Image (cartoon, rainbow, N blue to C red):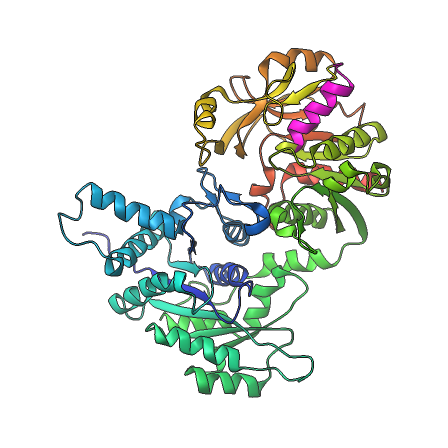
């Protein structure tokens, strides 16, 4: 007898009133709640921009580029999904307007539409639906969460809402819409206002969709009167209005949602029978509890070059790094105190590098380009000489190698081909296979992207931290340590403790622990695999060393 085909349920998450309302965290939290009820969940992000992926966008405008295991360069919300759901996603879980249109146009050029007139509607929504169903099938999901980027009423995301409407008409009972809205409390009025949410709900109605559940974001919890008002004017049940007040941490959100019975309400909307009699959020609650009960502080300076955005500090550029620091601090029963240091201030002299002495550890995340790097090199030199635990990621490793080459290995003019390709000693060089692409200014998708293996050397910090000989980590870079200088750098005392299996590419560089408590950097991005319930071993080793430096 043929196996009965699984009926997948779909939950579309949209945003109302304003951007930045928390759709990504809401979607991730919904997934966590459904997992706690025994369901297998996958998550999909739809970004309504023409870019094919997030790889070529300026991080100060868009935030972090999160790299999936298959190398897809995506929106930072994909990182939230992976961290909350403790799972690896792939490129089928991410789509943009550009990616969808590109596929439809390609198929039209290949005559796959058999000569028929190809139109925005219904062919673009059909392609969106095809991708959603493929993502659900490939992950064998019971429930697929689909976050639609942007805000209701914006022209660019209407086509994706239309896809959800079409899917709901095709599979009534299998599709739910959750709207995350915002309820302001004007300071001069002193009352929580529901009118913007009512307007957003009507905008959603205007494109043929009725919200089944409204998550009401606000500074404070909603009272009964506000819930009833939203229910009356937005045409939903009062208990389908979920209060989402500001909380101490994003990891409190799933627990907070469950206070309003969110999981049971969503199961009722989708006619889903929980696979567990009771939601099991025990491990999650233990993590949240531990995140608040640290008995010591650890002060980490994150020295980056993408923090400035007008008069504001844009920490979203490094969100995976910051979260990875937190997970490992919590593991060591410590409260992380993260301090943002702009490398441009050190380079310009507005900040003295000696001010870093007050921090327990220094971390330099990834980046590209010339701006601020001489400031970072000063920071690395200071950390090395003052024995302050240092952890470099990607560019943070390349600059560690440059600093060591200049100041220890007697290569005073050592440089990277990214900035000074004509330097006498190009210690960091571009991968040969990418040079032709760069020459032709073909920058999109030209990097070493996704998961690659690394072999770890015995007796090193890296090997002790991982506790195994071979690991797999995610990459996003074009440049490598130039093989011509590896022997010279090694003779000067730099240990390449992680390499590619063929020993051609240097993956981890460090100083022996007898010389420095923790001076280590990776060519890959370990932060992409750090999870709340599974902290990354290198981050944990760094935090442990930093605590010893208290």
**Residue 402 drawn in magenta:** yes
Q: Position of residue 349 (x, y in %)?
A: 81, 38
In the image, is 29 to the left or to the right of 1? right
In the image, is 262 to the left or to the right of 294? left
Name the dominant secondary structure of the magenta segment.
Answer: helix
Q: How many tags in the picture?
A: 0
Q: Position of residue 315 (x, y in %)?
A: 65, 51
Residue shown at 36%/47% (left/top)? Answer: 99
Which span is picked out in magenta?
A: 396-410
Vertical placement of residue 161 versus 310, above or below: below
Residue shown at 36%/61% (left/top)? Answer: 160
Asked which quadrant contains residue 413, the reply is top right
Residue 143 is at least partly visible in this image: yes
Q: Which residue lies furthest to the left in this view?
A: 115
Vertical placement of residue 380 versus 186, above or below: above
Please identify the quadrant where the C terminus is shown. top right
Please state which of residues 466 and 50 is positioned toward the viewer in this rendering.
50
Q: Position of residue 33 (x, y in %)?
A: 50, 63
Residue shown at 74%/14% (left/top)? Answer: 492
Residue 517 is at least partly visible in this image: no
**Residue 346 drawn in magenta:** no
In the image, is 108 to the left or to the right of 535? left
Q: Where is residue 243 in the image (x, y as percent from the top left)?
A: 56, 75
């Amino acid at each position: 007898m043929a196996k009965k085909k699984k009926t997948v349920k779909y939950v579309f998450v949209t945003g109302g009133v304003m951007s930045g309302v928390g759709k990504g965290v809401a979607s991730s939290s919904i997934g966590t709640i459904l997992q706690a009820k025994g369901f297998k969940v996958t998550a999909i992000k739809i970004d309504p921009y023409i870019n094919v992926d997030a790889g070529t966008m300026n991080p100060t405008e868009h935030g972090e580029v999160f790299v999936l295991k298959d190398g897809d360069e995506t929106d930072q919300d994909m990182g939230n999904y992976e961290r909350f759901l403790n799972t690896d996603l792939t490129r089928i879980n991410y789509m943009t307007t550009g990616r969808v249109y590109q596929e439809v146009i390609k198929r039209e050029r290949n005559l796959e539409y058999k000569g028929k007139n190809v139109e925005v509607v219904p062919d673009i929504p059909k392609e969106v639906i095809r991708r959603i169903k493929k993502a659900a099938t490939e992950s064998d999901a019971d429930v697929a969460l689909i976050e639609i980027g942007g805000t209701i009423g914006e022209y660019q995301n209407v086509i994706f809402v239309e896809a959800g409407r079409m899917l709901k008409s095709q599979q009534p009972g299998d599709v739910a819409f959750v709207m995350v809205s915002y309820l302001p409390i004007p300071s001069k009025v002193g009352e929580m206002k529901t009118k913007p949410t009512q307007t957003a709900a009507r905008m959603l109605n205007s494109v043929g969709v009725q919200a089944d559940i409204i998550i009401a974001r606000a500074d404070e919890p909603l009272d009964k009167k506000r819930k009833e008002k939203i229910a009356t004017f937005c045409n939903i049940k009062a208990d389908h209005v979920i209060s989402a007040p500001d909380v101490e941490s994003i990891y409190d959100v799933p627990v907070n949602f469950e206070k309003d019975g969110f999981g049971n309400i969503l199961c009722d909307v989708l006619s889903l029978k929980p696979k567990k009699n009771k939601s099991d959020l025990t491990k999650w609650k233990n993590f949240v509890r531990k995140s608040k009960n640290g008995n010591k502080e650890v002060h980490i300076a994150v020295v980056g070059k993408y923090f400035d955005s007008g008069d504001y500090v844009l920490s979203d550029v490094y969100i995976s790094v910051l979260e990875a620091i937190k997970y490992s601090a919590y593991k060591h029963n410590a409260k992380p105190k993260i301090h943002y240091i702009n490398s441009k201030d050190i380079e310009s002299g507005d900040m003295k590098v000696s001010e870093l002495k007050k921090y327990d550890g220094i971390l330099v995340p990834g980046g590209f380009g010339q701006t601020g790097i001489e400031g970072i090199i000063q920071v690395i030199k200071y950390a090395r000489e003052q024995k302050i635990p240092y952890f470099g990621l990607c560019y943070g490793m390349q600059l560690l190698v440059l600093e060591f080459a200049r100041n220890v290995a007697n290569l005073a003019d050592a440089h990277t081909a990214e900035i000074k390709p004509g330097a006498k000693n190009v210690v960091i060089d571009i991968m040969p296979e990418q040079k032709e692409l760069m020459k032709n200014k073909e920058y999109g998708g030209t990097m070493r992207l996704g998961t690659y293996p690394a072999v770890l050397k015995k007796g090193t910090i890296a090997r002790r931290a991982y506790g195994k000989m071979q690991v797999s980590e995610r990459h996003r870079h074009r440049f490598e340590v130039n093989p011509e200088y590896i022997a010279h750098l090694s003779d000067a005392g730099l240990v390449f403790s992680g390499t590619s299996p063929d020993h051609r590419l240097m993956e981890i560089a460090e100083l022996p622990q007898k010389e420095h408590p923790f001076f280590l950097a990776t060519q890959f991005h370990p932060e992409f695999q750090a999870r709340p319930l599974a902290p990354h071993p290198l981050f944990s080793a760094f935090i442990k060393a930093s605590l010893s430096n208290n």
